[in-house]
Image (cartoon, rainbow, N blue to C red):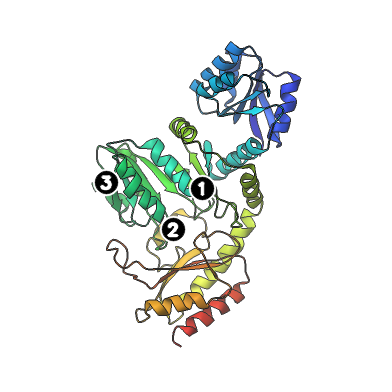
Amino acid sequence: MRLRVVVVDDSPPVLRQLIYLLGVEFDVVGSAEEGQMALDVIQNTRPDVVVLDLEMPLRNGIEVTRELRKLGPSPVVVICSVDTDPEIIEAALQAGALGYVSKMLLTNDLVRAVELAARVCELEGGTRTLLAPSGLAAISLINFALLKTGDHVLVPISVYGPNRKFASVMLRRFGVETTFYKPGTGAGVAALLRETTRLVWCESPGSVTMEVEDVPAIVAEAHRAGALVALDNTWAAGVYFDAFAHGIDVTVQALTKYVAGHSDVLLGSVTVRDEKLQQPLGETHNLLGYAVSADECSLALRGMKTLAVRLQAIEKTALALAAWLAARPEVELVLHPALASCPGHEFWKRDFTGSAGVFAIVLQRQYTKEQVLRFVDSLELFKIGYSWGGVTSLVVAYDLRGNKDRPDYGHRIVRLNIGLEDAEDLKNDLGRGLERLNA
């Protein structure tokens, strides 16, 4: 992957700073001294990033920044000296610059953020990607950028818990009304759409209960009503489900999970299909003060190098364990999208190219909550933890009692995250735990 860069004022010192700043392979696809020439170059090349030297005449530096931001979504970064007047820098930021970097105090923060955003965007097949401090921060960014007081949003019941709570608490506080729909609704969302519906959320498969949604049908109805569709694509890692090919407008990923892959990062991403969505998202991103560190971006870039081999190994082990668990007498149901027993399996088979390592099992009805927790506690290789997607296998017990909108799994549902341990070792660990259910 090579970044497409435009340099405004291509003097040798600026180019040297640019090389140090990016620290990755790049092509200077255009350069210009200042003024209208720079604007023409931007329009013709559509670069990934524009680097602007504020040491050019003040009027041009600020005005060019302002004009560049009017053109579209290409982020503008200004380079300044340590003694540049802070008011000049502030004027550049107010004009729309994404950020500024001192020639004397260059760090890797912007370097790694630009590279990671470009790589995630390429992975998902989008046009632009913004980074956020966490997956939930990325979800919040979409809601804040695309919704306003008086709007209506549709959210699946099976959505990631904090996303549901954000809608119920924060969006409600700001006058946005939420309707929660069943994940099997598909084209039936047409009956739930209103004139004020601006956004429809999808999460496929759903969190914990793993229902696969009929995303193309939902997209068709939402777009017919003039609403945008957002998808949490974390389970598929932006790999197993081509969101934009299925009509999604904006995707979110918790890069914390499979992309970073080692349980040592908090990061999120927002990727768009249409560049027009970058403007409200980018503006909100800036106003919320979102920032990501060089260390975490570097760790996510490290994870991307092994993403393919990790996903392949995890998929193979998870499928083998899911099939084995389905035959166990202690298990009533296996909720793995690649198995026919999972709600929406037919949509997984039609729309996905593979499966990840997160799935759930529902134990038989005779087991009490205490027995289920004993099973979880007895596992040795599976650690107890929520944040899946790493190399270590995890297990969490849930209790859905009291939630009339969720399937009747009660306290018997247990979610598994399959890591990179030996498949036979994991099977033996689960087998010993299941045997203790009847002890």
Say whether disc 1 or disc 2 marks the residue closer to the N-terminus: 1
Q: Which of 362 and 174 is in front in this view?
A: 174
Tell whether 108 sits left or right of 134. right
The disc placed on residue 321 is: none
* Amino acid type at mark 2: Trp
Q: Is residue 237 above or below residue 171?
A: below
Q: How crowded is mark 1: few (under 14 residues within 10 Å), some or many (20 or more)?
A: many
Q: Which residue is drawn at 31% across and 47% down?
A: 154
Tell whether 368 sits left or right of 53. left
In which quadrant of the rendered view does residue 349 lie?
bottom left
Q: Distance between the residues labelled 1 and 3?
A: 32 Å
Q: How far apart are marks 2 and 3 (CA)?
A: 22 Å
Q: How crowded is mark 2: few (under 14 residues within 10 Å), some or many (20 or more)?
A: many
Q: Residues within 10 Å of mark 3 (few under 14, many from 20)?
A: some
The disc placed on residue 134 is: 1
User: Can see residue 166?
Assistant: yes
Q: Residue at x 49, y 21 (%)?
A: 70
Q: Is residue 199 above or below residue 21?
A: below
The residue identified by callout 2 is 348
Mark nearer the viewer, 1 or 2: 1
Q: How far apart are marks 1 and 2 (CA)?
A: 27 Å
In which quadrant of the rendered view does residue 177 lie?
top left
Q: Nearer the viewer, residue 311 or 414?
A: 414
At which x and y percent is residue 367?
38, 80
Q: Residue at x 58, y 18 (%)?
A: 88
* Amino acid type at mark 3: Ala
The residue identified by callout 3 is 190
Say whether disc 1 or disc 3 marks the residue closer to the N-terminus: 1
